[in-house]
Image (spheres, rainbow, N blue to C red):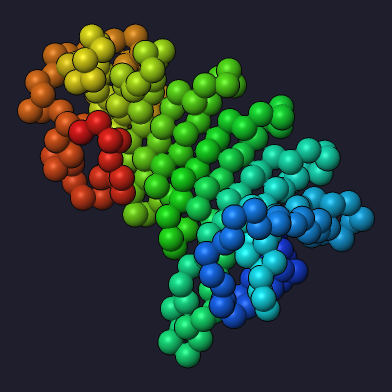
């Protein structure tokens, strides 16, 4: 069990998340309370859970975690509740993560965002690779939790480079339609070629796998599209 799973497991025990859920929609102005937790027993608070108290239950909505123990939160998790899969306990609901923000380099700024689906699937992540406060890279995942497409915004306010397993497609004129393609055998190679248009060849719209995802094998298709096609 990795550190994050251990923290979530411990916090689950503290809050008794799997209580009977007899809740109604939250009333306007409901009080949010904080539960500080020392998950590893060293006398320091490393996790704060934000929750709303309900009758015989707690509804956790947000968790902050200080994973490296430096006194500053570096992981922020928004929670939802999944419907019980147990027919004998239909009112029991479990906590599920729906959104995470992470400060990967511990500089006090979030540089990675994860958008999550049920069953711990990752829909997509947004990454600020150069730590300038702008999330220029979006990564899309398949059902096996593998990145199958990366999109890079090179400064236009929308993606212009689309990286797949063996090719990168480039929108060179800003019309949101890839018109050049490079081939390669690694993610880094494809990014370098695409950024520099090295070995780029013209690409017809009908041959673009970004515009025509059905050209990709099923295992190479993301769970979600980019919203552009």
Residue 173 pos. (x, y %): 23, 9
Viewer-side residue, 63 vs 165: 63
The residue depicted at 84 percent of the width and 52 percent of the height is: 45
Q: Is residue 1 visible?
A: no
Looking at this rendering, what residue extends furthest in the right direction? Answer: 43
Looking at this rendering, what residue extends furthest in the front direction? Answer: 28
Residue 128 lies, with reference to residue 43, above or below; the image says: above
The residue depicted at 70 percent of the width and 40 percent of the height is: 74
Residue 28 lies, with reference to residue 24, above or below; the image says: above
Q: Quadrant of the C terminus?
A: top left
The residue depicted at 35 percent of the width and 28 percent of the height is: 151
Residue 117 pos. (x, y %): 42, 55
The residue depicted at 67 percent of the width and 76 percent of the height is: 55
Q: Quadrant of the N terminus?
A: bottom right
Viewer-side residue, 168 vs 42: 42
Q: Based on the displayed image, in which of its 4 quarters is residue 203 positioned?
A: top left
Residue 189 pos. (x, y %): 37, 22
Residue 95 lies, with reference to residue 196, above or below; the image says: below
Q: Is residue 149 visible?
A: yes
Q: Based on the displayed image, in which of its 4 quarters is residue 138 positioned?
A: top left
Residue 111 pos. (x, y %): 58, 30
């Amino acid at each position: 069990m990795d550190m994050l799973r251990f923290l979530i497991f411990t916090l689950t025990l503290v809050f008794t998340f799997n209580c009977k859920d007899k809740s109604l929609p939250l009333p306007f102005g409901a009080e949010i309370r904080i539960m500080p937790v020392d998950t590893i027993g060293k006398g320091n608070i490393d996790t704060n859970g934000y929750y709303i108290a309900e009758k015989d239950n707690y509804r956790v909505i947000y968790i902050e975690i200080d994973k490296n123990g430096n006194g500053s939160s570096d992981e922020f998790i928004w929670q939802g509740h999944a419907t019980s899969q147990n027919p004998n306990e239909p009112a029991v609901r479990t906590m599920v993560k729906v959104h995470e923000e992470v400060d990967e380099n511990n500089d006090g700024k979030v540089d990675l965002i994860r958008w999550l689906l049920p069953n711990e699937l990752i829909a997509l992540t947004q990454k600020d690779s150069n730590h300038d406060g702008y999330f220029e890279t979006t990564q899309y995942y398949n059902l096996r939790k593998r990145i199958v497409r990366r999109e890079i915004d090179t400064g236009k306010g929308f993606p212009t480079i689309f990286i797949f397993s063996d090719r990168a497609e480039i929108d060179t004129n800003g019309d949101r339609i890839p018109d050049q393609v490079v081939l390669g055998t690694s993610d880094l190679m494809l990014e370098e070629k695409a950024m520099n248009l090295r070995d780029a060849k013209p690409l017809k719209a009908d041959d673009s796998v970004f515009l025509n995802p059905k050209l990709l094998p099923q295992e190479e298709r993301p769970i979600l599209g980019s919203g552009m096609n």
